[in-house]
Image (cartoon, helix red, strand yellow):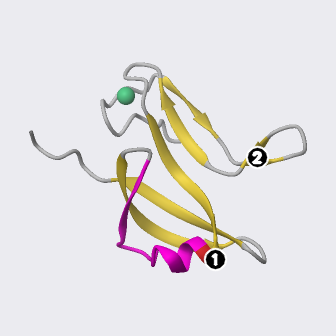
Amino acid sequence: MATRCCPYCGSSDGELVSRSLTRAVVQPHQFWLCRRCGRKAYEIISCTGRELRLYMLEPGKTFTKEGQEYVVQRVLRAGDREYLLYVRPCPEHES
Ligand SMILES: [Zn+2]
């Protein structure tokens, strides 16, 4: 398994929180939690078909979640009403 690292600070000290739909833990998204900078970087975002249409989400589209910009890489249908967005954080804007 490839070592993941934080897309913001490059640290590999963090935790990957995977999708989990067991009864005990309902965690529809997958994201990386960085211990160094404390930021959360989504990798997979679960959404409904309605949200998909509302925000016109498709590969190449950028959108904002929790104040961070992401680019949609892939859209996969996961069920009757669920879609999975594979996303990548946009590069930080130069300040
Ligand atoms: Zn970080």
Residue located 77% across and 73% down the image:
79
Alpha-carbon neighbours of circle 1 within 10 Å: few (<14), some, or many (≥20)? some
Q: Residue furthest left?
A: 95
Image quadrant holding the N terminus, namely: top right
* Ligand 1 within 8 Å, label 1 CB: no
* Magenta-colored stretch includes residue 60: yes
Count of number-bearing discs = 2
Residue located 69% across and 48% down the image:
19
Marks 1 and 2 sit apart, C-alpha to C-alpha, by 20 Å
Direction from residue 17 to residue 68 in the image, left or right: left
In the image, ligand 1 is in what quadrant?
top left
Residue 94 drawn at (x, y percent) = 11, 43
* Ligand 1 within 8 Å, label 2 CB: no
Q: Amino acid at mark 1?
A: Gly
Residue 76 drawn at (x, y percent) = 61, 73
Residue 28 drawn at (x, y percent) = 70, 51
Image quadrant holding the C terminus, namely: top left
* Magenta-colored stretch includes residue 62: yes
Alpha-carbon neighbours of circle 2 within 10 Å: few (<14), some, or many (≥20)? few
Q: Nearer the viewer, mark 1 or mark 2?
A: 1
Q: Quadrant of residue 15?
A: top right
Which residue was labeled with disc 1? 49
Q: Quadrant of residue 38?
A: top left
| Label placed on residue 20 | 2
Q: Amino acid at mark 2?
A: Ser
Residue located 36% across and 71% down the image:
61
**Over which residues does the magenta segment extend?**
51-65
Residue 55 drawn at (x, y percent) = 46, 73
Residue located 43% across and 67% down the image:
73
* Marks 1 and 2 close (CB-CB < 8 Å): no
Direction from residue 45 to residue 12 in the image, left or right: left
